[in-house]
Amino acid sequence: MSQTEYQDIVYDVEDPVATITMNRPQALNAFTVRMLKEIQHALAAAESDERVVGIVLTGAGRGFCPGMDMNALDSMNSGSGGQPEDLSHLEANPGDADLGENFQITYSYLMSIKKPVIAAINGACAGLGLAVATLVDMRFVERSAKFSTAFSQRGLIAEHGISWTLPRLVGSGNALDLLWSARKFNGEEAKSLGLAERLVEDGESKEAAQAYIRELAASAAPVSMRVMKAQVYRHMNAELGAAMQETNDWMASSLKRDDFKEGVRSFIEKRPPNFERVKG
């Protein structure tokens, strides 16, 4: 699918970065059913594109994503005559199915994408938007970005895995505070809590995330990053012995790859490495 065929996002690839921009700035990029499908489709495209080492997810205008657009939900989910909109052309299955069924439920597929996924959070990030942001690998957050879980104030519970991700990022007490109170907090507090891996000045999150991926592409083996991502997420729930055994098996495989030979050779020759890219 070309960039012009998407309606609610903009998808752009500039080797080695794929950038997915949620593009409903008039609604601060609130999710629609179509937008969620388009993001999933674009992630699959980026995952299968050999040029892409890492992926940036961000929002157009003043917002990242404040959650589901309740006003647009009915109309975006219905076509003429009240029939559901046909989004079958957007069906896609990104992510590594070999990681297991834990990573195939609703939005948990984000954690199994075979390449780094970074959220560049440039504004309002709440509700489902925040849940999705906790499921990607890293968060580059602008100082003035505004966050809220929002769920309790709508009579809802912690949605879509945020009860699993948020405590792992900020601790159980902080997670319960943010979930219970649904209070607003900014990028600086997000960094102090551990929700943000990078704090940047306003207007700089996308460029900072893209620059980080370019740095990775210049120095780190994409296949190694793919395996490390799988290790981190799979082993969060594994016992130590099982994690060590799987690590030993995967390490033995890595020693046989050309990337290992290239890593050693480039170090000895004092030159940048030329690693293989990850394909779909």
Image (cartoon, helix red, strand yellow):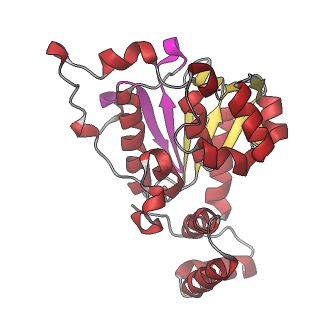
Quarter of the view holding residue 134 = top right
- Tell me where residue 26 appears, x and y as whole percent: 50, 11
Residue appearing at x 62%, y 20% in the figure: 153
**271 above or below 93?**
below
- Asked if residue 268 lies in the magenta stretch, the reply is no
Residue appearing at x 22%, y 38% in the figure: 88
Residue appearing at x 20%, y 30% in the figure: 86
Furthest-front residue in this view: 155
**7 above or below 239?**
above
- Tell me where residue 97 appears, x and y as whole percent: 40, 63
Quarter of the view holding residue 58 = top right
Q: Which stretch is magenta? A: 4-28
Work out whether residue 204 can be spotted. no
Furthest-left residue in this view: 81
**240 above or below 229?**
below
Question: Is 102 or 62 nearer to us in this picture?
Answer: 102
- Tell me where residue 22 appears, x and y as whole percent: 49, 28
**Image quarter (top left, top right, bottom left or bottom right) of the N terminus:** top left
Residue appearing at x 58%, y 18% in the figure: 61
Residue 2 vs residue 27: left or right?
Answer: left
Quarter of the view holding residue 183 = top right
- Asked if residue 5 lies in the magenta stretch, the reply is yes
